[in-house]
Image (spheres, rainbow, N blue to C red):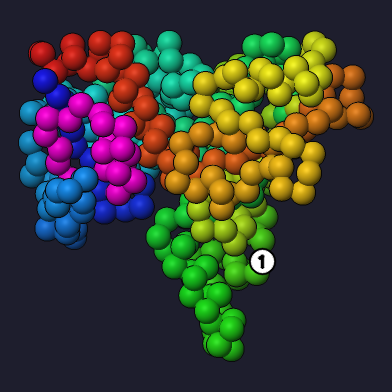
């Protein structure tokens, strides 16, 4: 017997990717429903060889659903996730709405699977920020080995992190530059084509953005609040795939060879690290893949116990849709979904 699954926000980039990944991993689905806001009623999306027409979230009966994958805005999720959870299904939410709620587990299955049972408090599980997800997958095994003291992260985030509008803007601006047309920004504050923008989100009083704040708050919740972490988030003219330059200082000794071996043997990680001109991963190569890729592993010669690493992942997959589906798989493996399905 399979599960009754609904994807809310099924017409967006991440919602469509959720449908693709459910099919790819052969998640045990008995019924699948595409759900969206009223403006998307009847819009068609694909699930394998099936075509699904989107249903209205306002009138959809969630009481007959076991699990809901939410790919919506934070404001929408704040309103709808509790309503849906009260009707019975487990809600796995991809927005920022619930990540720091103490009664909602924030999960990356390779990192903190033991937190899954905490969904019982509100019926909601949160997906982390796309940049946080790939970061913690790489940090956790190293932290377990040598104790991370401090981390400095610079992100190189693709335009797909800003949704379809971000991807369209990069495409349109790039074409316009070659045709000597207008390149006025709409989605982003400055031109993104042939440029980088050291600003994602909204500025806080301390000069950091909320995107940067999310990364350290979520890392603390998922791994260890004692880790000191500072972040600069940068938008780059890449369609899909986030990259991160990560500098790590440890409490205890660890060198690059040990780190390479630890990472090779850690779940969800693929190490591509050769000392030649092509021996590293780029976001283009990571697109469409499930793994978090780690390259450029090397000792930091300026501190007693330090490493530099380069971390890349498909932000629509591990950073969003894949992680949500993996949480559903985790609930299935732990028998928590079956428990819900039989009630």
Crowding around mark 1 (Cα neighbors within 10 Å: few <14, some 14 to 19, many 20+) is few
Q: In the rendering, at what x and y percent does residue 93 appear?
A: 34, 34
Q: Can you say whether 104 is above or below 321 in the image?
A: above
Residue 279, given in percent of the width and then of the height, sits at: 71, 42
Where is mark 1, residue-wise? 195
Q: Which residues are magenta?
A: 16-34
For residue 253, which quarter of the picture?
top right
Secondary element under disc 1, as helix, strand or loop, is loop
Q: Residue at x 74, y 37 (%)?
A: 274
Q: Quadrant of the C terminus?
A: top left
Whether residue 178 is visible, yes or no, is: yes
Image coordinates for residue 159, horizontal then vertical, percent: 52, 57
In the rendered view, tell whether residue 70 sits above or below residue 118: below
Residue 292: image x %, image y %? 55, 34
Q: Nearer the viewer, residue 273 or 43?
A: 273
Residue ID at (19%, 37%): 6
Image quadrant containing the N terminus: top left
Query: How many marks on residues?
Result: 1
Q: Residue at x 71, y 35 (%)?
A: 273
Q: Is residue 206 above or below residue 114?
A: below
Asked whether 17 falls inside the magenta stretch, the response is: yes
Residue 103 magenta: no
Q: Is residue 26 left or right of residue 177?
A: left
Describe residue 240's horizontal placement relative to residue 324 as left or right.
right
Judge left or right: residue 200 versus residue 33: right
Q: From this viewpoint, is residue 208 visible?
A: no
Snapshot quadrant of residue 60: top left
The quarter of the displayed image where residue 229 is located = top right
């Amino acid at each position: 017997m399979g599960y009754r699954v609904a994807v809310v926000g099924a017409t967006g980039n991440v919602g469509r990717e959720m449908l693709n990944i459910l099919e790819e991993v052969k998640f045990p689905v008995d019924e699948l429903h595409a759900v969206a806001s009223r403006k998307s009623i009847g819009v068609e999306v694909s699930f394998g060889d099936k075509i699904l027409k989107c249903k209205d979230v306002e009138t959809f009966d969630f009481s007959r659903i076991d699990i809901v994958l939410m790919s919506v805005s934070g404001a929408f999720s704040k309103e709808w996730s509790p309503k849906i959870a009260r009707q019975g299904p487990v809600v796995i939410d991809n927005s920022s709405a619930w990540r720091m709620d103490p009664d909602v587990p924030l999960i990356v299955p390779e990192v903190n699977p033991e937190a899954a049972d905490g969904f019982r408090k509100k019926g909601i599980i949160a997906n982390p920020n796309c940049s946080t997800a790939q970061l913690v997958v790489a940090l956790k095994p190293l932290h377990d080995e040598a104790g991370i003291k401090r981390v400095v992260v610079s992100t190189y985030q693709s335009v797909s992190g800003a949704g379809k509008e971000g991807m369209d803007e990069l495409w349109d601006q790039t074409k316009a530059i070659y045709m000597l047309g207008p390149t006025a920004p709409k989605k982003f504050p400055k031109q993104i084509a042939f440029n980088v923008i050291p600003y994602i989100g909204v500025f806080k009083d301390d000069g950091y953005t909320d995107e940067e704040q999310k990364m350290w708050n979520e890392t603390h919740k998922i791994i260890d609040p004692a880790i000191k972490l500072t972040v600069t988030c940068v938008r780059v003219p890449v369609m899909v795939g986030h990259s991160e330059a990560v500098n790590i200082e440890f409490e205890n000794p660890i060198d690059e060879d040990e780190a390479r071996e630890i990472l090779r043997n850690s779940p969800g990680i693929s190490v591509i690290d050769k000392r030649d001109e092509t021996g590293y991963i780029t976001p283009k190569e990571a697109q469409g893949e499930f793994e978090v890729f780690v390259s450029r592993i090397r000792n930091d010669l300026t501190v007693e116990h330090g490493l530099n690493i380069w971390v890349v992942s498909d932000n629509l997959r591990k950073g969003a849709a894949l992680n949500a589906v993996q949480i559903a798989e985790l609930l299935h493996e732990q028998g928590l979904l079956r428990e819900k399905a039989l009630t």
